[in-house]
Image: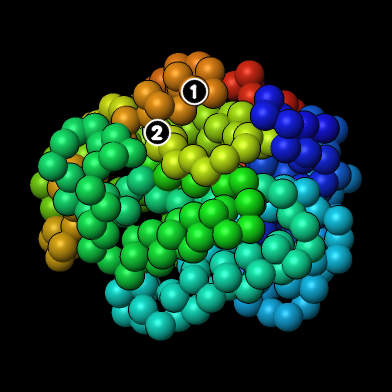
Amino acid sequence: MAGSGGVRAEAVCITGGAGFIGSHLADAFLASGRRVLVIDDLSSGRREHVPPGAELAVLDVRSREAAERLERDGIDLLVHHAAQMDVRRSVADPVFDADVNVLGGLNLLEAARRGGVRQVIFASTGGAIYGEQEAFPAGEGHPVRPVSPYGVSKLALERYLYYYHVTYGMAVTCLRYANVYGERQNAQGEAGVVAIFLDRLLAGRAPTINGTGEQTRDYVHVSDVVRANLAAAGRPGFHVYNVGTGRETSVSELYRVLARAAGSSLAPAHGPAKPGEQQRSVVDPGLIRRELGLPEPLGLAAGLARTAAWFRAAAAGAAGTTTAVSCSGAAAGGGGG
């Protein structure tokens, strides 16, 4: 199977494929007829989110065993989502952040080079890589001035990937995600605000908004992230794309929409602002839509309603925790980045 530019992508390795985003990608690549290998150490991913038909190797991306598996398994496309993704942890322990995100990534890239992997799709960050923006929304040409070790590590791997493209001819697409939310997101640990708020609301507890609540983010549903990855598969060359909506939503407005979707009348609590928190973050997704023909992203109200329904089912103990997000935007019943 080849993409529009002819890069073969029949066998896919998804690192972090038992996680929130990665498990949806495993579903989608399997549905497109690819063979799928998932590499995940299950530190935050869940075994039950890996779909039937995908092979799971429980390995740390920094390990020799993970490199050997990637090198020897006949992989055409590496979709790299495994990461240390907690910005606050990156500040507290930048050495650990770099160990996972930079050295772990390089461990895989060297294995990919030795094993003849033809393409890498890399889950980068649009929320952290631009730093304090000077233009809204930020296009791919916006200056990259990350202000956290997490953002620095993602930018570093983008630069390494360019080196591998130029030196070894590896096709590369870096996808700079905005704030991704949706079904299967974990409300614990490194979770995003949507999952945290829904977890609290459905438990009858008031979520806390830090600061004024007027800080903005670009919230993109996981189904749009899946579309972007599928469209990038098989694409030759080196590319960097934003994946977002181009729309800013304040935390206060997000809370109001979520409360409606959850059927809650609880008022939020308010806490102090987080030191150094970005006040505005939004990316311009125009380039990927033009070049790869992606449709308009799912609207926030519709996406939050779907997400709230999944969290409600999970809270009731009746969640289809392997429910797939289809690229048409509809959730398939029956059924874990």
Tell which of 72 and 137 is nearer to you. Answer: 72
Residue at 73 percent of width and 80 percent of height: 64
Q: Is residue 335 left or right of residue 161?
A: right
Residue 25, labelled with which disc? none
Tell which of 150 and 145 is nearer to you. Answer: 145
Between disc 1 and disc 2, whose residue precedes?
A: 2
Give yes or no for contact between labels 1 and 2 (Cβ–Cβ under 8 Å).
no
Residue at 82 percent of width and 40 percent of height: 10
Q: Which residue is label 1 attached to?
A: 291
Residue 289 location (% of width, % of height):
46, 22
Tell which of 239 and 42 is nearer to you. Answer: 239
Cα separation, mark 1 vs mark 2, equals: 15 Å
Residue at 13 percent of width and 42 percent of height: 134
Q: Is residue 118 left or right of residue 131?
A: right
Report how many numbered discs are placed on residues in the image: 2
Q: Which residue is label 2 attached to?
A: 244
The kind of residue tagged 1 is Glu
Q: Quadrant of residue 89?
A: bottom left
Q: Secondary structure at mark 2?
A: loop
- Residue 168 vertical position relative to residue 71 in the rendered view, above or below: above
Q: How is the image coloured?
A: rainbow
The kind of residue tagged 2 is Gly
Q: Is residue 332 visible?
A: yes
